[in-house]
Amino acid sequence: MWRLLTRPALSLLIIGVLYAVGLQPALADPRDFTLNNSTGEVIANVYVGPSVSSEWGDDVLGRDILNPGQTMDVTFSNFVSGDCQYDIKVVTQSGREGYLYKIDLCSTSTVTFN
């Protein structure tokens, strides 16, 4: 009797795990991207905002910094279909600013600042 109950339970567990693992990529926001720091300087601030807005929003680095040669993952939530064009601003510790405008984050997975 124990063997008869164990097989279905184990099968259901395996199916559940495979379903959950297969669902992970589907849950990622298409605007998520990796930011590469190739500036040769420490990046102190990173701002990402919709291209249609004049507001930058909060610094996605928070209290962190991004050293030269390092990368960071920028993630989004609450995706709205068609909301793909974004501007990105970085500020180095020395105060230099860099901008990228109208980046289609739905089709771009890596953004590099030189």
Image (cartoon, helix red, strand yellow):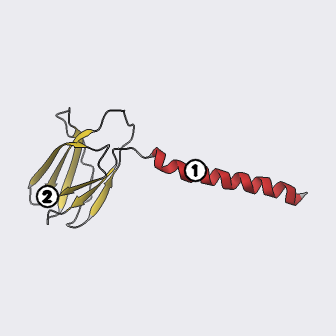
Query: Residue 109, position in %: x, y?
Result: 31, 52
Query: Residue 37, position in %: x, y?
Result: 21, 61
Query: Residue 88, position in %: x, y?
Result: 20, 46
| Residue shown at 37% from the left, 44% from the top | 30
Q: Earlier in the sequence, mark 2 or mark 1?
A: 1
Say if 5 sits above or below 83 in the image. below
Please identify the quadrant where the N terminus is shown: bottom right
Q: Amino acid at mark 1?
A: Ala
Q: Secondary structure at mark 2?
A: strand
Q: Is residue 83 toward the left or the right of residue 21 in the image? A: left
- Residue assigned mark 1: 20
Q: Is residue 72 toward the left or the right of residue 13 in the image? A: left
Q: Secondary structure at mark 1?
A: helix
Q: Amino acid at mark 2?
A: Thr
User: Residue 96 occupies which quadrant of the picture?
Assistant: bottom left
10 Å crowding of disc 2: few (<14), some (14-19), many (20+) = some
Instruction: Evaluate if marks 2 and 1 touch, with contact meaning CB atoms under 8 Å apart.
Output: no
Q: Nearer the viewer, mark 2 or mark 1?
A: 1
| Residue shown at 66% from the left, 52% from the top | 15
